[in-house]
Image (cartoon, rainbow, N blue to C red):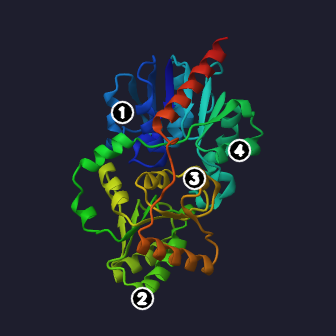
């Protein structure tokens, strides 16, 4: 089977969608006769270079003027190139398909979230425009849609009236053996210097992640801790600066520089990230909306207690083992701060199970969908 894939997320540093693709590709059954052709406008990023060690994975890079921008390459150059390329299936890995796909080429779409429809103002204007132009077409053109959570699938089906028998869920996951290997690598100085008394948040800093709420929570916690006196209490944000307001960044950096207890770490490698999870006292994630929540899942692998916003996808992951607290009012800010203090002082841990969330299971479900989709086309 020759599978073509939208590989643009693999041209940037490791992030949510990029990690999903990276780990799923590595976990595909090696015994199956699969060849992957990864199409992107730019070179593969170093954080994903391990993929090219596999003989069945080929990097297909665009060239010329149209490859200067990802949208131009994907929507104009790639469709014409695919008409000359012998594929059995095209995988739209970030919920859009290129227009003018060959009519006889089946397509599987990975659907990550409905941010475009639920929280459009949290997206960059250009991304919002591109999604609006191609989202409905992509859903209609898809032979099958793989969602990354049950909640995302239900929302997608309701939004587009998509046939349920052409939809399934392939949860993102973790690879415990790989994580343990990463933890055997000596922790770097910037991780060791943080100590143990820190709260961790992991994601790009953007409006949907609701960091403005968490900043107010941490200010409240800072005041409460004057009585509890937890030494060197910090809030560590592992993530790059995204599409946020300059006013918020100024506010965040003001607190960081004045109190020295808010630390922002960018460009972490996988080993550093998992040492962060392991050393943290508590995990925070206050998102307004998520298609899934890989950082939450990874923190729970390390048995960390988490306080998160009460959204359905987080509840799919944490079940009854973590705290879900609203993120709307000043009373909620105080509730987060008080509960955080309780968990840190009592060294609370996560006691639930996340066994069903593995990259192997995700890859197997994706492979079965590919196989069935191609088989149905050939009948």
User: What crowding class fits label 3: few (fewer than 14 Cα within 10 Å), some (14-19), or many (20 or more)?
Assistant: few
Q: CA distance from mark 4 to mark 2?
A: 46 Å
Return the mark for residue 51: 1
Spot occupied by residue 119 in the image (x, y as percentages of width and height): 65, 58
Front disc: 1 or 2: 2
Q: CA distance from mark 2 to mark 3?
A: 48 Å
On screen, residue 306 versus residue 199, left or right, reads right
Dot 4 corresponds to which residue?
A: 154
Dot 2 corresponds to which residue?
A: 227
Q: CA distance from mark 4 to mark 1?
A: 32 Å
User: What crowding class fits label 2: few (fewer than 14 Cα within 10 Å), some (14-19), or many (20 or more)?
Assistant: few
Front disc: 4 or 1: 4
Front disc: 1 or 3: 1
Pointer 1 with pointer 3, Cβ within 8 A: no
Return the mark for residue 152: none
Mark 4 or mark 1: name the one nearer the start of the chain.
1
Mark 3 or mark 4: name the one nearer the start of the chain.
3
Mark 4 or mark 2: name the one nearer the start of the chain.
4
Mark 1 or mark 3: name the one nearer the start of the chain.
1
Q: How many marks?
A: 4
On screen, residue 308 versus residue 359, left or right, reads right
Spot occupied by residue 103 in the image (x, y as percentages of width and height): 66, 21
Quarter of the image holding residue 96?
top right
* Residue lying at the far top of the rendered structure: 379
Can the viewer see residue 62 in this picture?
no
Dot 3 corresponds to which residue?
A: 126
């Amino acid at each position: 089977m020759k599978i073509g894939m939208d590989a643009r997320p693999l041209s940037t540093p490791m992030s949510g969608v990029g990690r999903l693709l990276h780990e799923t590709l590595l976990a595909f059954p090696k015994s199956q006769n699969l060849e992957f052709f990864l199409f992107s406008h730019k070179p593969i990023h170093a954080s994903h270079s391990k993929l090219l060690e596999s003989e069945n994975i080929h990097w297909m890079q665009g060239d010329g003027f149209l490859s200067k921008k990802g949208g131009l390459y994907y929507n104009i150059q790639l469709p014409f190139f695919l008409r000359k390329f012998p594929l059995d299936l095209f995988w739209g890995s970030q919920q859009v398909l290129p227009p003018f796909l060959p009519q006889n080429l089946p397509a599987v779409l990975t659907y990550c979230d409905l941010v475009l429809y639920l929280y459009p103002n949290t997206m960059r204007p250009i991304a919002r425009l591109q999604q609006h132009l191609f989202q409905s077409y992509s859903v209609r053109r898809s032979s099958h849609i793989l969602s990354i959570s049950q909640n995302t699938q239900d929302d997608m089906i309701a939004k587009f009236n998509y046939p349920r028998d052409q939809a399934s869920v392939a949860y993102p996951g973790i690879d415990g053996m790989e994580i343990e290997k990463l933890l055997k690598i000596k922790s770097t100085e910037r991780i060791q210097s943080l100590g143990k008394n820190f709260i961790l948040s992991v994601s790009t800093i953007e409006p949907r992640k609701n960091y403005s709420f968490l900043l107010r929570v941490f200010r409240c916690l800072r005041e409460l801790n004057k009585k509890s006196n937890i030494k060197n209490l910090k809030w560590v944000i592992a993530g790059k600066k995204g599409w946020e307001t300059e006013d918020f960044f100024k506010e965040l950096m003001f607190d960081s520089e004045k109190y020295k207890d808010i630390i922002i770490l960018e460009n972490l490698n996988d080993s550093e990230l998992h040492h962060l999870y392991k050393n943290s006292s508590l995990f925070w994630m206050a998102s307004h909306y998520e298609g899934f929540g890989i950082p939450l899942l990874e923190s729970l692998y390390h048995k960390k207690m988490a306080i998160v916003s009460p959204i359905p996808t987080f509840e799919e992951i944490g079940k009854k083992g973590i705290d879900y607290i609203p993120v709307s009012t000043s009373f909620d800010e105080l509730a987060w701060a008080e509960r955080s203090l309780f968990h840190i002082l009592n060294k609370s841990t996560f006691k639930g199970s996340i066994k069903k969330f593995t990259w192997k299971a995700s890859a197997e479900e994706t492979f079965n969908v590919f196989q069935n989709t191609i088989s149905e086309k050939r009948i």
